[in-house]
Amino acid sequence: MFDKFKKTVKNLSDDVKSSVTEKEIEESDIKSSLEKFRLQLLESNVSLKAAEDIEASITGRLIGETAGRLSIEDEINNAIREELENSLKEYKFLEAIGDIRNPVIFFIGFNGSGKTTTLAKLSSYLENQGLDSVMGAGDTFRAASMEQLEEHGNALSKKVVKHGYEADPAAVAYDTVEHAEKEDKVALIDTAGRSHADRNLMDELQKMVEVNEPDITFLVVDGLAGNDVVEQLKAYDGMFDALIVTKMDIDDKGGTVISAARESGKPVAFLGNGQAYDDLEEFDKEKFLDELLE
Ligand SMILES: Nc1nc2c(ncn2[C@@H]2O[C@H](COP(=O)(O)OP(=O)(O)O)[C@@H](O)[C@H]2O)c(=O)[nH]1
Ligand SMILES: [Mg+2]
């Protein structure tokens, strides 16, 4: 996993090792290695700010040390780990919904990021925790997405609340919440993918939020989104509580998780790592860092 990221870190260690001597390390000794490293981090989908933080952390650790007396590799790995320990946060989902009687959960994000699939996975996850859920087909913009949700509902034996194509999604969500309250379920509400440019869809989403007051809103981002993720976070700024990063099974870079967490300051709740219903993992920071740096 994350082979590209690992290779980037290894390249830096090799570069630094070959450029420092037995005396104290000075900034000039590692400057060009770090510049190359920064570019490689960017290629691994790490955002510029996050890359600069990581670089600063490494610089802070290495400068003034005597090269012969320390393992460059360990120092670099530890510096990156320390920096990411600080910027990555876990989200305790079950604790977050623990005291809420009928939690209302929204899934928002760009088209194709994995909202509908993740909603179904979360329904299955809740089922494993002994919690029943209802699905709300709040993406009334794309007809196929209602069918997609219905298929998931059938496969998981869950009720799907839907109105017609181009129906008011706020009303769909409202009915879903009502059903959840009546039947003592968790309400999982899908929404249409949208971008900042879609002013109407953005207003529609605002209305859905105002009418239905979700307890938790997840922003679903595609692990392969790369630098695009910064745009997506901006579009949904202030509208979500935690992140879900999908398609980790086909991402060898890992940078999207780092950028999304660093740029939004929000915790990461789950990682999606496949197409099956149980391919949803609670985000475990230590495990992620072990896989990234091992
Ligand atoms: N490999 C992989 N594919 C995923 C994952 N999550 C979603 N997908 C796929 O990504 C595509 C878009 O997902 P969808 O849920 O329709 O996205 P939405 O437009 O945000 O609702 C679908 O083909 C999903 O099967 C994941 O964790 N891993
Ligand atoms: Mg969808």
Image (cartoon, rainbow, N blue to C red):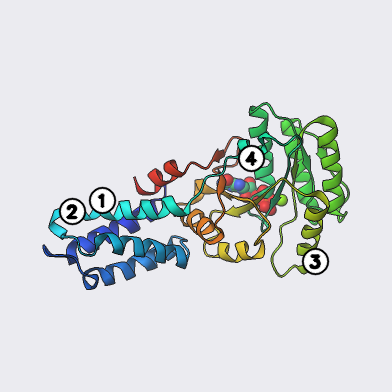
Task: Residue 83: name its quadrant.
Answer: bottom left
> What mark, if any, has residue 70 been given in the picture?
2
- Amino acid on which the number 3 mark rests in the picture: Asn
- Amino acid on which the number 2 mark rests in the picture: Leu
> What mark, if any, has residue 101 been given in the picture?
none
Between residue 214 and residue 169, name the one nearer to us: 214
Q: Earlier in the sequence, mark 3 or mark 2?
A: 2
> Up-down: is 242 above or below 50?
above
Q: Please provide percent x and percent y for residue 144.
A: 77, 50
Which element carries disc 1, helix, strand or loop? Answer: helix
**Cα distance in 3D space between marks 3 and 2:** 58 Å
x 25%, y 58%: residue? 13
- Amino acid on which the number 1 mark rests in the picture: Asp
**Cα distance in 3D space between marks 3 and 4:** 31 Å
Which element carries disc 2, helix, strand or loop? Answer: loop
**Cα distance in 3D space between marks 1 and 2:** 8 Å
Left or right of 118 on screen, residue 274:
left
**Cα distance in 3D space between marks 1 and 4:** 36 Å
> What mark, if any, has residue 74 been given in the picture?
1
x 42%, y 53%: residue? 84
Q: Earlier in the sequence, mark 2 or mark 4?
A: 2
Q: Please provide percent x and percent y for residue 140.
A: 82, 53
Q: Earlier in the sequence, mark 3 or mark 4?
A: 4
Locate the C terminus and report the quarter of the image it occupies. Answer: top left
> What mark, if any, has residue 200 been given in the picture?
3
Nearer the observer: mark 2 or 4; the answer is 4
Which element carries disc 4, helix, strand or loop? Answer: helix
x 86%, y 39%: residue? 178
Residues at marks 1 and 2 touching, judged by CB atoms closer than 8 Å: yes
